[in-house]
Image (tube, rainbow, N blue to C red):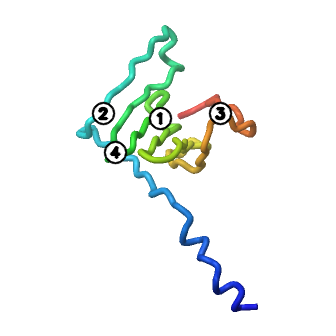
Amino acid sequence: MLVAFAGLPNLQAEEETLPPVTIDTRDDLKRSVVPNASSDEEHEPEVVIRKRGKNMVEEYRINGRLYKVKVTPEIGPPYYMLDTDGDGIMDQRHDKLSDPTSTPQWVLFSW
């Protein structure tokens, strides 16, 4: 039985893993901000686009709080990292944003 599995290639070694993305909030990096075209600027996200090596990182903020990051690698499809509980840590990763299980994240009170 062991001999039959010894001839199979190691499937885990062949899996391609994406490197982790670190979000650097320093202002000395080259970045561009996409201005909002809406008159209701309080609720529109501010989008900061950064080039990280061969990857493009788009940071989405509302009221200065980072809530979503879109990473577009040189090779492969883009993916999104989301802060679901508002603590500043990107704790979910999605390949697309049309996730039917996402819930509204309204801030009712903050102090």
What is the CA distance from the residue labelled 3 to the residue labelled 4? 29 Å
Name the secondary structure under disc 1.
Answer: strand
Q: Residue at x 54, y 43 (%)?
A: 79
Task: Tell me which numbered mark, 3 or 1, is placed earlier along the sequence.
Answer: 1
- Whether pointer 4 and pointer 1 mark residues with C-beta atoms closer than 8 Å, the reply is no
Q: Which residue is mark 1?
A: 65
Image quarter hosting the N terminus: bottom right
Label whose residue precedes the other's in the sequence (1 or 2): 2
Q: Secondary structure at mark 3?
A: loop
x, y percentage for residue 63?
47, 27
Circle nearer the viewer, 2 or 4: 4
Say whether disc 3 or disc 2 marks the residue closer to the N-terminus. Answer: 2
Observer-side mark, 3 or 4, equals 4
Q: In x, y percent, where is residue 98?
A: 67, 34
Residue 40, position as x, y percentages in the image? 51, 11
Q: Which residue is mark 2?
A: 31
